[in-house]
Amino acid sequence: MIPELGEFALILALSFSFILAVIPLYGAATLNTLWMDYAKPLAKAQFTFLLISFICLGYAFASDDFSVQYVANHSNSQLPIQFKLSAIWGGHEGSQLLWAFILSGWTLAVSLFSRGLPLDMLARVLGVMGIIATGFISFLLWTSSPFLRYLPRFPADGADLNPLLQDFGLIVHPPMLYMGYVGFSVAFSFAIAALLSGRLDAAWARWSRPWTNVAWAFLGAGITLGSWWAYYELGWGGWWFWDPVENASLMPWLVGTALLHSLAVTEKRGVFKSWTLLLAIFAFSLSLLGTFLVRSGVLTSVHAFASDPERGFFILVLLLLTIGGSLTLYAFKAPNVKSESSFGWLSREMLLLVNNVFLVVMAITVLLGTLYPLLIDALGAGKISVGPPYFNALFVPIMSLLALSMGISGAARWRQTSMSGLKKQLLIPAIISLVVGSIFPFIYGDGFNFRVFLGITISTWVIATTLKEFKDKFRNATSMTAKLSQLTPSYYGMMLAHMGVAVVAIGITLVSVYSEERDMRMAPGDKIELADYQFEFQGAKKVTGENFTADEGTIVVTLEGEPVVTLYPQKRHYTVKRSMMTEASIDAGLFRDLYLAMGEPLGDGGAWAIRVHYKPYVRWLWLGGLLMALGGLLTVFDKRYRSKSLTEVAHA
Amino acid sequence: MTPKRQKRLYIILAIVFGTALAVGLTMYALNQNINLFYSASQIAKGEAPTDARMRVGGMVVEGSLKRSSNSLRVSFDLTDYENTVKVVFTGILPDLFREGQGIIAQGKMDAQGVFQADEVLAKHDENYMPPEISETMKAKKEAAQ
């Protein structure tokens, strides 16, 4: 009964989103206030029924209703309750329901926090979101309903969740990531609404900015969590694989980063309008493309669930309609867009544009590397795969250039800036970063290393220029504390995010260059040494968990005779799925991780294949990612967004 | 030419030049870093180059897995049910590596016709067969009929 209720609620949600897609947009086109007024209640109704549907699926999981196919395939009565609930998005159907649910959540949020928005704009934005929701809920209902039953005979127990997914990571990573993916639909809807109404002023950018920043922050946090999860869960200590699905999330993030900077310029200076619109369209299109790549099964990846060509086709059609429709609209309307001011060759506008181009080029490079195998296959020219060296070869130089111009643009002024002024501003940070970059590899490592030099130099450059700019704010300030409170949250957010970039760059550089790794055959009593640490294997014993049995190794780690930690990596055997899984044991630290994983048992003497990693500064990767996300969130608390909207209410 | 047009010309030239450079570098990087996929039969026929990184896919032959007694060196045979190729790998095999299962090995052919793998990939699904393998095997079946 409950699953049918869920399905029924989904159908009702589709009806409401269809009405939302039609009535307010038509009202906005004909200036019919009554019809435009329908947008808000429709957004609420759509959210309510998707919420009901979502709760129904959650109930089916919690109550072990294995007559529901999706539950039977992704859960088991032995599964701990928190994983039963997060198994809702542990497979294709449920994760698409989560997608639609989050979309309705964003729609609701726009309808609630939009007091300053003129009615016709709000009606258009919600209407466009209604169109997207209509497409997605149809997709759910027609190709991937999570509420289908096994009737009349259903299995006595479920097939269990993939052991890799039985982890805290599953609870947080997909919702975060989807918040970001789907959040770009808001920026997209604002762009389309602006094109439809022809009102592309600074106000439009101001409305769209907080939404974009929040979506971007969630996407960044989602990617960061995914990287952290893969690191400890996959058992071989990698934190980024250039897997097609990771690329699918990185591309919208890169374009989103370009978008939020371009929006800032549009709001402040009234230029780059058509470019900003294009970025908004592409950020969301890439989110959809990511969904297509993952769901269609055209690419082999660790994330590809059971794939189905029909589903892929449906999303491909949605994708083509979105991109085709929005670009057609753009082609007709964008030529009318006028810049409100001009800027010189050497100005902050120009430098931000250059940054934008770097980010977009990077996104295109990733896109090319991801789609190239598909292209070659479609042309019948053989089966290939593009490996990490390709991505690394392009990522490192492009990102270095980006970091370089990032520091310069912070020092440049709007409109026009002088070369000599820039030199004066940047000379000291440049010297500091070159010196730190050159000395660091000698102090930390054992000799000059170009990659470390490059990585540390650009990270120091970003930190030094950011701090210099911060310090210069106080040049004419009489009181330190007064100035501190005068600076806006969006300024602090920017500082935090830029610091995050430097922290990530330090992490990537040091963990890539100074990681040490050994795969060893170890019998009980065997010792190895790695990066000054001694690891002694004391043998393995059997242990039993809630739904698995495991061999658990005991490894004592010492540093110069002093005990550091004892680690217990496991080789788990999940009884229901009958699959093996490596559970790494990690001693985490701000400056280094010790990472131990068990391979397979070797021979009768109790020997095991043991993987030992020493990973310096690996935490900085995720720390920096979180700093960026926090920075993005902080900008939303800017008074500007609230006070302006209130004054506009007063005017209206 | 008005100054405004001149400015535009420079911008367009810069974009064209930049794009050409980016595309050129990208294509170069792609060509250096793509891994072609070969089946055991293609290798047996000598179609695969030596000394180039590539991928070999196939099913692990039952009973062919041999471990060295004092290191992590393993060897096994990969088959596409027509020809087999011997693979040598030093390291920890993935969790789902099993005899009789489809896997992909990445590495180089050596002069002795043994595939020296530096990476072995298996899929987290018991019934998984790499699409490349299932396709070559389908083609085999059709050719046999």
Image (cartoon, grey):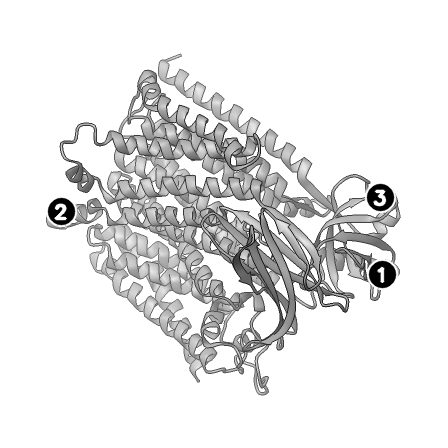
Please tell me which residue lies in front, A398 or A370. A398
Q: Earlier in the sequence, mark 3 or mark 1?
A: 3
Where's residue A67, x and y in %?
A: 53, 83
Of residues B78 and A24, the one nearer the viewer is B78
Check disc 3 and report the residue beneath it: B47
Mark 1 sits on what residue?
B81
Q: Is residue A194 above or below residue A452?
A: below
Q: Nearer the viewer, residue A428 or A373?
A: A428
| Residue A299 visible, this angle | no
Q: Chain of mark 2?
A: A
Compared across the picture, whether A613 is left or right of A202 comes to: right
Judge whether B50 appears above or below A184 on screen.
Answer: above
Would you call the spot at circle 3 few (<14 residues within 10 Å), some (14-19), or many (20 or more)? Answer: few
Residue matched to label 2? A647
Q: Residue at x 81, y 62 (%)?
A: B65
Q: Amino acid under label 3? A: Glu
Question: Percent x, y for residue A229?
Answer: 51, 58
Distance of mark 2 from mark 3, alpha carbons? 73 Å
Q: Amino acid at mark 1?
A: Tyr
Q: Residue furthest top?
A: B1
A644 lies left or right of A370: left
